[in-house]
Image: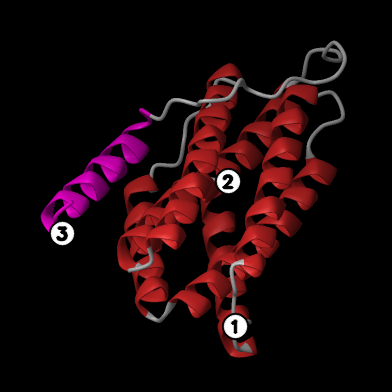
Amino acid sequence: MSPIDKWLIAADDARRTVAGASIASRPCPQPPAAPAAALDDAQKRLSAALMRVNHVGEVCAQALYHAQALATRDPALRSQFERAARDETDHLAWTQQRLRELGARTSLLNPLWYAGAFGIGWLAGRSGDALSLGFVVETERQVERHLQGHLERLPAGDAASQAIVQKMKEDEARHAEQAEQAGAKPLPLPLRWAMRAAAKVMTQTAHYL
């Protein structure tokens, strides 16, 4: 595949992600028991805000993994990034479906989130495979903590959102472990701090926009 073909595929991935045209390859996780009582308006607003943040995270994950796959020269590593991106496509579709069920919209800034994350992923990928994998580990560990926080904040009656977030958390942990096994290099502490600060800005903004 020529470089032009790869960039055209990357552009199409971006278009489908931002347009909300992603289709899951796995069924949406379901709660182990029947859902609890219907959510009131305040609970729906909270669930919608948290799931919108999670959807933005998946938009960014798509951009990061596709950019890193495009940047690496290692075919095996490219395949690993592409497999992870497919899992993130499921997450993207699941969170979008849940937002529709809650009568809520996705972030108005999704094109901006995607563009920014793609640029970061490209830079990480061009910095060398070990550092790129280290970036995956740090990103996914941060996402794990973020999702655990959402599990604690979601309304007790919102079993549907909880089931989705729990499965996402398990997938993110697996992605981090796979990156570590592939030879990830730990990131410098200042870079980890910068990533956390950027993530905080994104999550606080996406909560509302």
Give the residue number, with chain letter if any, for mark 3.
3
**178 or 88, which lies in front?**
178
State whether the magenta stretch is mostly helix, strand or loop. helix
- The segment highlighted magenta reads 1-21
> In the image, what residue occupies the spot 33% across and 69% down?
73
Amino acid type, mark 2: Val
Task: Tell me the distance, in whole angstroms, between the alpha carbons under discs 1 and 3.
Answer: 29 Å
Q: Is residue 209 visible?
A: no
Task: Tell me the distance, in whole angstroms, between the alpha carbons under discs 3 and 2.
Answer: 33 Å
Say the numbered circle drawn on residue 187. 1
- The answer to whether marks 3 and 2 mark residues whose Cβ atoms lie closer than 8 Å is no
Say the numbered circle drawn on residue 53. 2
Amino acid type, mark 1: Leu
Q: Does residue 140 appear left or right of residue 3 in this picture?
A: right
Task: Tell me the distance, in whole angstroms, between the alpha carbons under discs 2 and 1.
Answer: 25 Å
**155 or 180, which lies in front?**
180
Amino acid type, mark 3: Pro
Position in image of residue 151 (x %, y %): 80, 42
